[in-house]
Image: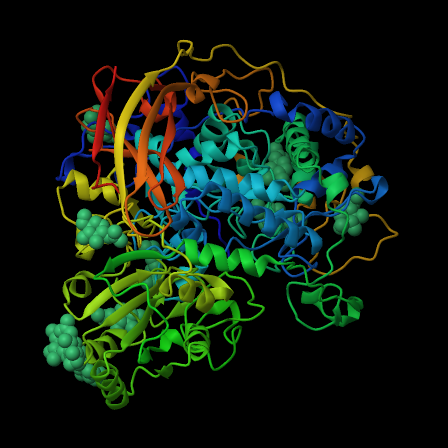
Amino acid sequence: MRLFAPLCCLAAVSPVLGQFGNNGAPFPNVTYRTGVSPNPAVVLGAQSNQISPPRYPSPWGSGEGEWADAYVKAREFVGQLTLEEKVNLTTGTGWQLESCVGQTGSVPRLGFRALCLQDSPVAGLNVAATWDRDLAYARGEAMGLENRDKGINVLLGPVAGPLGRSPEGGRNWEGFSPDPYLTGQLFATSIQGIQSTGVQACAKHFIAQEQEHFRQTPEARAYGFNITEPGSSNIDDQTLHELYVWPFADAVKAGVASVMCSYNLVNQSAACQNSYLLNQVLKNELGFQGYVMSDWQATLGGVSSVLAGLDMTMAGDIVFDDGISYFGPNLTIAVLNGTVPQWRLDDMAVRIVAAWYFVESDTKVTEEPNFQSWTFDTFGSTHFHVGPQWGTELVNQHVDVRREHGALIRKIGAESTVLLKNNGALPLTGKERLTGVFGEDAGSNPLGPNGCRNHNCDTGTLIVGWGSGQAQAPYQVSPDTALQNEVVSHYGSYESITNNSAITQIAALARRTNDVAGVCIVFANADSGEGFVNIENNFGDRKNLTLWQGADAMIGNVTKNCNNTVLVIHSVGAVELEAYKQHPNITAILWAGLPGEQSGNAIADVLYGRVNPSAKLPFTIGKARSDYGTDVLYTPNQPVPQFNFQEGVFVDYRAFDHRNLTPTYEFGFGLSYTNFTYSDLTITKLDAAAYTPTTGSAEPAPTYGSVDKDPSAHLFPANITRIPLFIYPYLNSTNLSTAYGAAGYGDNTFISEGALDGSSFAHTPSSGPSGGNAGLWDPLYKVCVSIANTGAVAGAEVAQLYVSHGGQYDPVRVLRGFEKVFLGVGEKKQIEFVVRRRDLANWDTGAQDWVVRDGVKVVAVGASSRDLSLTGTLE
Ligand SMILES: *[C@@H]1O[C@H](CO)[C@@H](O)[C@H](O)[C@H]1NC(C)=O
Ligand SMILES: *[C@@H]1O[C@H](CO)[C@@H](O)[C@H](O)[C@H]1NC(C)=O
Ligand SMILES: *[C@@H]1O[C@H](CO)[C@@H](O)[C@H](O)[C@H]1NC(C)=O
Ligand SMILES: *[C@@H]1O[C@H](CO)[C@@H](O)[C@H](O)[C@H]1NC(C)=O
Ligand SMILES: *[C@@H]1O[C@H](CO)[C@@H](O)[C@H](O)[C@H]1NC(C)=O
Ligand SMILES: *[C@@H]1O[C@H](CO)[C@@H](O)[C@H](O)[C@H]1NC(C)=O
Ligand SMILES: *[C@@H]1O[C@H](CO)[C@@H](O)[C@H](O)[C@H]1NC(C)=O
Ligand SMILES: *[C@@H]1O[C@H](CO)[C@@H](O)[C@H](O)[C@H]1NC(C)=O
Ligand SMILES: *[C@@H]1O[C@H](CO)[C@@H](O)[C@H](O)[C@H]1NC(C)=O
Ligand SMILES: *[C@@H]1O[C@H](CO)[C@@H](O)[C@H](O)[C@H]1NC(C)=O
């Protein structure tokens, strides 16, 4: 099976160069968005078959700023390496050949260990619902510590792609929010938390993999879809910058060590070999100093990917366990035959080693991997995929790395539970005469908390979605267990039914609960996950926005009989709730997301008022699916499916505001058991230097050490045992034209214009080391408001600041600040938002820079995107 076909390297094919190859020429028209209206036909820049402009050479790391020390060490180290040793750093050794889900080669001669890369990010969605940077940091740190103690160097998260263009997107829950500002803030603090432990974070997936359908050709074909390439996300340049790249700028600013490119194509060029995305946007504009790794099997070309900015290929092999690689020996050959210049390989190696020093892995990660990803057995094959004849060893030491993190998980679970409706039903007292609990989603999975591998089933309560973003649960406290314990501790009566088909019993228990003025609590869910798993024809992405497990009928039979019904939703994102919002017998609704192993304890904390809910929706819950104006493409529209992002920046609440549609619950909405009032908005203009577009160009690309051009110096060493299918850096033959091993050069014959030129590259106007032009981050305004707790209990409020940019094609408003403040009864505090230049800027495609356009910019502060009691203007 061959993944490669010509389309995926369009950016490296000569006709494209002929049209758009000159950096000085006007940008191809397809990257302009000239207008957006409810009629998508007028959106340019999101058209089928539009192409990504080539940008070469690949910028070499400057090692400026916070990265300076790491670069000094990395350059010195790389200067000692041979060609094969450098190649080893860039190439995974193959799927299931070593302990970790991804593992690079090593440099035994100098004691540099193989880097261990491991899933997973779990539910960023719930972190988003907390709107709490401190909790995001704490979670990141906790994950970092656990990973470090397992011997992991690179944690493959957090996630800001998918951003959440469509609520149906299967992996939205791995990330944070469809709002790029909220995502960017929590993405950055998560990264800082992870990297404080010596473990590298990996900002993924770059970029615009907004649906699972058609992300990979073989996967889609296995599902019976006849596609020839992964789908292409067609995006205009302004939307790319203002929406999808935005949080990645925060990540780079936060010092993220690595970035993972995604499976999809963007404007017909594979994300992992798209020179515009990797060379121009990530490495030039954002000044990214770390390295780019591919998603697993997302590398679709060798030389073409390397020249377009890919630094590491994962899992190393082209297709899992085919024993061949686009990197490995091919990269060694490509350097020897001159198609990859030494400076480019050196830059790849320096970036990888600098990232290692940048997070202080050298002193902080002392453990070698003490686990194996492929088995739970204690002893097993050293190289799992090839079996015991190639060695056996202690593969799993079963090290418990969790510390007291259960308490943090419980806290995040409660702090991320959004109270959507409350007719005075909550908090519960615990003294209810009878508590009736209903729903499969309240109970345990009879197969056990890890009974479905990768959580690839929706059985029992939902604590996480499926796929590589999930994690093994050490236990699972179900709502049924926690609520029963609670009620029993108050000497109350408790009955639960977790079989949604037991309609007779459900109706009877609801009626009995009603008769004694008790409380009925119903649990329901909706699941999604990664594309390699299909549950009930949900190929990763959800096929609808309704509840699963037959929950609607179950709920209907409860509400028909019980006039005090509390509804709790565990879901991967928005579900249709309008009917339940309107239902008189539903007295409260809570959205609890994917809370993890402390699920039951966390919901009990909120239901019984130990935690006063302060979470806010990190997405919009619309009345109807069609209201979002975006959706997954479920059926290929071409052999290379075309995802046309015709909505531009108008996703989620921006779409509802733009089209003046009333949602069920708006973005940023969430109730409390107390009330808050906002007052006293003041705006202070700060002294900031004028914005200076970056000019100039880079010094020539440095090289470190020299390459022995004699092919015989790079042959497979006689003294090592060759593990089958393992990816090594060595040559099989001194004849370079046959050493690559298979017929045909395929994708590697064409070298884009300027790609080999290491003399210089021009800095783009918005560029700067680590996050882009420093002026973008300058604070321009301080906005202060006072918030008072005017209710009867202490609680926290998430105050939100929105900006209206005021342009004809701008969203009505966009989130540009949030602060969570805790207030005792009667307490009043002043809080401060800082508005930075980038918060007020638009991306100008013509200028290829951010501009703050003239005109009045309005700020509004309040409790949600539609509850904004205070407004002011910025001059
Ligand atoms: C953009 O280019 C296409 C051909 O590539 C052309 O048909 C179209 O008219 C151009 N649009 C504009 C606005 O220039
Ligand atoms: C490349 O990495 C592999 C796996 O870690 C190791 O066995 C081999 O010795 C390395 N080669 C070189 C040249 O360092
Ligand atoms: C799949 O699509 C390709 C390209 O459109 C076409 O040539 C081929 O016949 C199709 N195969 C099947 C089995 O339909
Ligand atoms: C080099 O890459 C080509 C695809 O471009 C592949 O066919 C070949 O097997 C690779 N060689 C090795 C040794 O991995
Ligand atoms: C150089 O080597 C690479 C990797 O094997 C190959 O793809 C490319 O076609 C070769 N180029 C030349 C000019 O031999
Ligand atoms: C709910 O039902 C109970 C029992 O029938 C009744 O006493 C109570 O008044 C009802 N409450 C409402 C709000 O209708
Ligand atoms: C939506 O999908 C879920 C999961 O496959 C399914 O249980 C449910 O019945 C579907 N809803 C409708 C209205 O078909
Ligand atoms: C009660 O459950 C039955 C069986 O699933 C279903 O047909 C019926 O519509 C439900 N009743 C209500 C009011 O939802
Ligand atoms: C609400 O519950 C009561 C029982 O207390 C029932 O009589 C009534 O029909 C229910 N209302 C609806 C709209 O289902
Ligand atoms: C909050 O305010 C509303 C009306 O402004 C009032 O009905 C409600 O009782 C208050 N809630 C609390 C908990 O003080």
Asked if residue 715 shows in the view, the reply is no
Q: Position of residue 463 (x, y in %)?
A: 44, 65
Is residue 419 shown above or below 757? below
Left or right relative to 43: residue 571: right
Residue at image location 41% in from the left, 52% down from the top: 125
Between 73 and 742, the one nearer to me in the picture: 73
Using residue 588 as the reference point, say whether residue 220 is left or right of it.
Answer: right
Q: Position of residue 499 (x, y in %)?
A: 34, 84
Vertical placement of 872 versus 353: above or below? Answer: above
Side of 576 relative to 469 (left or right):
left
Front residue of 204 and 444: 444
Residue 149, picture quadrant: bottom right
Which residue is at the far right? 719
Q: Return the residue nearer the eye: 267 or 596.
A: 596
**In this picture, residue 22 sits left or right of residue 851:** right
Evaluate whether residue 535 shows in this view: yes
Q: Image quarter for residue 591? A: bottom left
Looking at the rendered structure, the number of numbered marks drawn on it comes to: 0
